[in-house]
Image (spheres, rainbow, N blue to C red):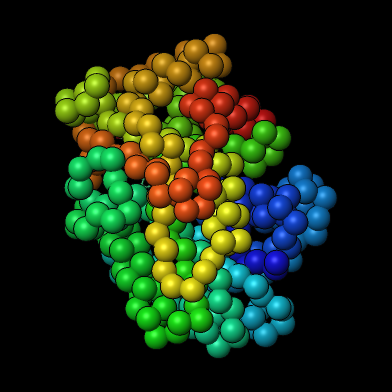
Amino acid sequence: MQILVTGGTGYIGSHTCVSLIEAGHSVIIADNLSNSRYEVVSIIEQITGQRVIFYEVDVTEEAAIAEIFSKHKIDGVIHFAGLKSVGESVEKPLLYYKNNLLSTMILTDACIKYGVNRFVFSSSATVYGENDVPFEESMTLKPTTNPYGETKVMSERILTDVVQSNPELGVMLLRYFNPVGAHESGLIGEAPNGIPNNLMPFVTQVAKGKLPKLHVFGDNYPTVDGTGVRDYIHVVDLAEGHVTAIEQVTRGVRIYNLGTGRGTSVLELVKTFEEANNIEVPYEIIERRLGDIASCYANVKKAKKELGWVAKRDLIAMCKDSWHFEKK
Ligand code: WQD
């Protein structure tokens, strides 16, 4: 199939493009390069040996999106493009609502106009809000702590309503947890602009000496060692989950957690990283970060049962691959 991947030069998008091509599909990337680099296109071609069609567009530009749909036969869309910083969304809510909701509406509208019936949406575990772990797809969502999370809840609702009025359309809502790691080549990985928000890129930059030490945001949570617990999933497992989803789309809306089902604390991750890579990661415990929850990890039964998908790579592989990418 020919798949349009929005945000395809980003961290998860680029890994998904590689996995799509390796599964025999072809890829068109639409990305505005606001948080990624054009070089990633040629790196994807280098890794896979296949050409990639690239459009530097903002997915909120309706005319630009229509042009892509009119020029190519698109069999499915995987929509990653979006703003995703929890902290920034609190400071700039309108930017987040406009960008993340408009892009979803414009893409869905184009799919209906051009008869594209496969849509995979990049959602997030954030939508569960303060539910009890492990998070399950059937849970009633609770308010999230930030506009970013709300844009994911609202996008899921928009897509659900659109499917009601367009029974031909099939939508997969993929709620992922904490993606980490990198492709085994070390050529693509998580390369945030500026100081990393997320834990793993911060750890790798400390290990490399680019940052002096890791600040651990609080050790007084009700968890195994007091630090935050998350479900870290290898980005290649996540990419493969997207390939499975786009291939298995059926009419209607289906929701899946993409996680490992295992919770890991910040200090457990740091220790695993140090042992896996035989390197020191100095850290200091400081106060909690606003908006953080104590524990977040997935019930992964549904994706295994209905899609036949499970995460295969363990935390040691995630730590080794993240470090391999950072060193490159
Ligand atoms: C993980 C743990 C922190 C940095 C966010 C978004 C989520 C998704 C993934 C988009 C927490 C602790 C972190 C640091 C630390 N993004 N931490 N020091 O917050 O679980 O999820 O990124 O889809 O939507 O919410 O990820 O990597 O920021 O934090 O102690 O310098 O590491 O407190 O417990 P998070 P994270």
Q: Quadrant of residue 256?
A: bottom left
* Residue 278 place in picture, x, y as percent: 54, 11
Whether residue 227 appears in this view of the structure is yes
Residue visible at 45% across and 18% down? 272
* Residue 313 place in picture, x, y as percent: 55, 32
Image quadrant where one finds the N terminus:
bottom right
- Front residue of 146 and 92: 146
- Front residue of 101 and 231: 231
* Residue 168 place in picture, x, y as percent: 51, 81
Residue visible at 77% across and 48% down? 48
- Front residue of 231 and 183: 231
Residue visible at 59% across and 84% down? 115
In this view, which residue lies farthest toward the front?
A: 305
Ligand 1 position by quadrant:
top left
Q: Quadrant of residue 113?
A: bottom right
* Residue 57 place in picture, x, y as percent: 60, 71
Residue visible at 42% across and 63% down? 254
Q: Is residue 47 left or right of residue 218?
A: right
Up the image or down, 101 lies above or below 189; here it is below
Up the image or down, 269 lies above or below 104; here it is above
